[in-house]
Image (cartoon, rainbow, N blue to C red):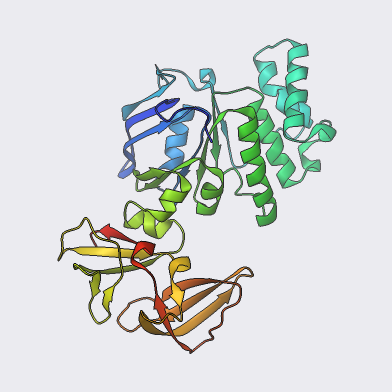
């Protein structure tokens, strides 16, 4: 986590908008990114997250709005002069150069003294754990090692801000999980502010101090992973982050009344009684085989090793209720079971 107090901003993005023809890529986006923070931009394809990254890097210019870094106007600075580095998903290493030459390239272009370049390259090779591979060429490396070279090349320049565009998408699942840990460790070690763009919510949740969820060019919610998961601000976030049971009904004094189903437990609502709202309850909060609750029939059981996902058909609901249980399930296909949850385990979201 950032050592800095919450009020301090490194990057301040205010009311940034960008259109491409009929597409509103960014619509009045405002965000504050703190020093030393690992910040994720998360959303489906086409939500505007890459456009925002390119604006920070200087490859795009917004139609309106402002971006400052350390209080100074970033948009007035040409890309190569910004204390910002962008790492692409393709890594774009020079194939004819060794690992150490790839890493030194940016420093050589800045005409730094040779001794300083050597020291900085050696230090960063050590940081990313590639000391023994300094003389290799990119084609002699694994995907994970190439990823480390690209990272080393970016952090050796000591940018204030490192931008990562889907940095792990080219890696297979196991290497990806290792690199997530590595990225987090590195970020803590080098103390550079990281902004990562991803459509993979697990990646964002495991890496970031805070996440901005974007949809159709707008920021839906900015929060740390746990509150984002437990208290989604709207239906889009509730549906996009993790699996969720979403049930729409009418708010009553006793709970959420759903036609043909009954009154379901939910927390007291800020919404007026009689208004339409949507209940969100996470599968791991749903209890199977409870005494009360709704009666349903098991339609699917999926075993994931540590947990099992059970889908239960309940009459009157348009989609099955999902419950996640620890270990193997005690119910089977076609079994009758009861499903229940407590009011505090659900979240009520205004509007249908």
Q: Is residue 241 left or right of residue 276?
A: right
Q: The C terminus appears in which quarter of the rendering?
A: bottom left
Q: Is residue 292 left or right of residue 260?
A: right
Q: Is residue 23 left or right of residue 302?
A: left
Instruction: From the viewer's side, name the closer residue of 71 and 226.
Output: 226
Task: Choose top left, top right, bottom left or bottom right for residue 266.
Answer: bottom left
Q: Does residue 61 lie above or below 29 as drawn?
A: above
Q: Residue furthest top?
A: 113
Residue 155 place in picture, x, y as percent:
64, 27
Residue 80 place in picture, x, y as percent:
54, 20
Residue 85 place in picture, x, y as percent:
56, 28
Residue 339 place in picture, x, y as percent:
41, 78
Task: Choose top left, top right, bottom left or bottom right for residue 103.
Answer: top right
Q: The N terminus appears in which quarter of the rendering?
A: top right
Residue for point 61% across, 33% down: 188
Q: Is residue 258 visible?
A: yes
Residue for point 63% across, 22% down: 157
Figure label count: 0
Task: Choose top left, top right, bottom left or bottom right for residue 314.
Answer: bottom left
Residue for point 33% across, 51% down: 233
Instruction: From the viewer's side, name the closer residue of 98 and 196.
Output: 196
Instruction: From the viewer's side, name the closer residue of 93 and 198.
Output: 198
Q: Is residue 59 visible?
A: no
Q: Is residue 30 left or right of residue 50?
A: left
């Amino acid at each position: 986590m950032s050592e800095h107090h919450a009020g301090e901003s490194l990057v301040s993005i205010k009311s940034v908008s960008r259109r491409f023809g009929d597409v509103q890529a960014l619509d009045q986006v405002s965000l504050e990114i703190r020093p030393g923070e690992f910040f994720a931009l998360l959303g489906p394809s086409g939500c505007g997250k890459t456009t925002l990254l390119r604006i920070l890097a200087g490859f795009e210019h917004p139609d309106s709005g402002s971006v400052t870094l350390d209080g100074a106007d970033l948009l007035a600075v040409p890309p190569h002069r910004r204390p910002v580095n962008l790492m692409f998903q393709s890594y774009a290493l020079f194939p004819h150069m060794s690992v150490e030459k790839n890493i030194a390239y940016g420093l050589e272009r800045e005409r730094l003294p040779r001794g300083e370049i050597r020291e900085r390259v050696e230090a960063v090779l050590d940081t990313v754990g590639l000391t023994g591979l300094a003389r290799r060429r990119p084609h002699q490396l694994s995907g994970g090692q190439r990823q480390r070279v690209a990272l080393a090349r970016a952090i050796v320049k000591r940018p204030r801000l490192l931008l990562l565009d889907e940095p792990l998408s080219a890696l297979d699942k196991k290497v990806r999980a290792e690199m997530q840990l590595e990225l987090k460790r590195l970020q803590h070690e080098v103390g550079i502010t990281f902004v990562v763009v991803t459509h993979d919510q697990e990646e964002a949740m495991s890496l970031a101090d805070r996440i901005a969820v974007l949809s159709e060019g707008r920021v839906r919610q900015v929060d740390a992973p746990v509150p984002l998961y437990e208290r989604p601000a709207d239906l889009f976030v509730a549906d996009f982050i993790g699996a969720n049971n979403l049930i729409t009904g009418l708010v009553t004094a006793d709970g959420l009344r759903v036609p043909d189903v009954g009154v379901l437990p939910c927390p007291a609502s800020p919404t007026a009684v009689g208004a339409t709202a949507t209940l969100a309850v996470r599968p791991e909060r749903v209890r199977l085989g409870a005494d009360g609750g709704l009666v349903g029939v098991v339609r699917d059981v999926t075993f994931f090793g540590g947990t099992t996902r059970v889908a239960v058909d309940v009459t009157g609901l348009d989609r099955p209720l999902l419950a996640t249980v620890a270990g193997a399930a005690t119910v089977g296909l076609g079994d009758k079971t009861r499903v229940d949850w407590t009011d505090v385990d659900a979240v009520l979201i205004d509007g249908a």
